[in-house]
Image (tube, rainbow, N blue to C red):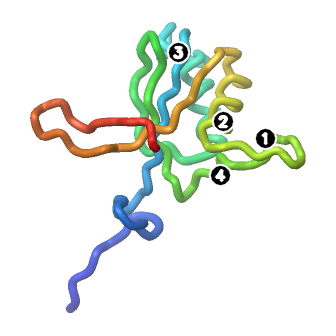
Amino acid sequence: MAAGITRVNGTAKAESFYGYQPAWYEIAGSGFDTTPTIVDSNFEKAVRAIESLASIVQIGFPGSGGFLVAVDGNTFNGTGNGGTAGVSETGAEALDRVITDATSISTTVTAKAVGKADFSGTGLVFATPA
């Protein structure tokens, strides 16, 4: 029997992960941390809005400035026209649009790249992609 790698979803891209292809985004905005565990909170509305574009792989609990989310890049259909013919948008712009529409919170969404594993105890390093 030959050994192989079992993939959960999709094919790994060069310099990427096997399995899910996580695309990280920082959702900055005030108000997501106000009663985030209640039904129909702004955080829950944001989660539903994100799920309208992609499968969530991991999501951080919201703080006063927002939260981090990783979506599966293989399911993310976040680049599109935003409903306007001839206008394209980035994944971050698509997330910003659907989250703001769902919550009325003014957000800034930034794509983040996992730079490296920092084994000194601080964990993964996130940076804005070049």
Q: Residue, x 42% and y 66% (percent of image)?
A: 13
**Residues at discs 1 and 2 in contact (Cβ within 8 Å):** yes
* Amino acid identity at mark 4: Asn
* Amino acid identity at mark 2: Glu
Mark 3 vs mark 4: which is more N-terminal?
A: 3
Q: Nearer the viewer, residue 35 or 30?
A: 30
Mark 4 vs mark 2: which is more N-terminal?
A: 4
Number of the label disc, if any, that sits on residue 107: none
Mark 1 vs mark 2: which is more N-terminal?
A: 1
Residue 83: x and y in percent read: 84, 41
* Amino acid identity at mark 3: Phe
Mark 3 vs mark 2: which is more N-terminal?
A: 3
How would you rate the neighbour count of disc 2 (Cα within 10 Å): few for under 14, some for 14-19, many for 20 or more? some
**Residues at discs 3 and 2 in contact (Cβ within 8 Å):** no
Q: Residue, x 28% and y 74% (percent of image)?
A: 5
How far, Cα to Cα, is label 4 from label 2?
12 Å
**Residues at discs 3 and 1 in contact (Cβ within 8 Å):** no
SS class, disc 4 = loop
Q: Nearer the viewer, residue 18 or 41?
A: 18
Q: Residue, x 76% and y 46% (percent of image)?
A: 88
SS class, disc 3 = loop
The residue labelled by disc 1 is 82
Number of the label disc, if any, that sits on residue 77: 4
How far, Cα to Cα, is label 1 from label 2?
9 Å
Number of the label disc, if any, that sits on residue 93: 2
